[in-house]
Amino acid sequence: MTTIADFTVTTNTGEPLDLSSKLGKVLLVVNTASKCGFTPQYDGLEQLYRRYRDRGFEVLGFPCNQFGAQEPGSDAEIEQFCKVNFGVTFPLMAKIDVNGENASPLFDWMKRQAKGLMGTTAIKWNFTKFLIDREGRVVKRYAPTDKPESIAADIEKLL
């Protein structure tokens, strides 16, 4: 059975991150963008991270420029924007694609594990969120319109 531990991603500083190191934590994996109507969700994501990180919770942000070219910056520019405007301290990864032939294998796997509306697998927009349990399994997919604070109860159940 595949879990998040079977994937390696790239951090925003270009270093490989073996996600097996995240086993034992509850994760919220999010495709993000800096120039989107949902960008203020960075505040809510950071609040969740600060509220639960001492209990084994982490947010992983994956910037993506596939939706309306709303994430045009470099990895360093994205990190700076997030820190200055939203106080983001949770880990940001290198910019990726979440759909199409160049899609991140991690996102391809998560999309198959938790399908979207009417059984679709494609990510429809920025700030689609996936909740991962401590064993590395996808528990639930959340739409971009689902505010981070609305996910708190589901996170609590897994901690």
Image (cartoon, rainbow, N blue to C red):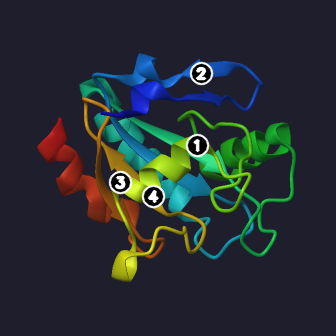
Q: Is residue 12 left or right of residue 155?
A: right
Q: Which residue is mark 2?
A: 17
| The C terminus: image quadrant | top left
**Residues at marks 2 and 4 touching, judged by CB atoms closer than 8 Å:** no
The type of residue carrying mark 2 is: Leu
Label 2 and label 4: CA atoms lie apart by 20 Å
Q: Residue furthest left?
A: 157
Label 1 and label 4: CA atoms lie apart by 10 Å
Say how many tags the image has.
4
Residue density around tag 1, few if under 14, some if 14–19, many if 20 or more, within 10 Å: some
Please, what secondary structure does the residue beneath circle 3 have?
helix
The type of residue carrying mark 4 is: Lys
**Residues at marks 4 and 3 touching, judged by CB atoms closer than 8 Å:** yes
Residue at 67% x, 20% y is 16
Label 1 and label 3: CA atoms lie apart by 12 Å
Label 3 and label 2: CA atoms lie apart by 21 Å
Q: Position of residue 155 (x, y in %)?
A: 23, 47
Label 2 and label 1: CA atoms lie apart by 14 Å
| Picture disc at residue 105 | 1
Q: Which residue is mark 4?
A: 111
Q: Which residue is mark 3?
A: 113
* Mark 2 or mark 4, whichever is nearer to me: 4
**Does residue 108 appear anywhere in the picture?**
yes
* Mark 2 or mark 1, whichever is nearer to me: 1
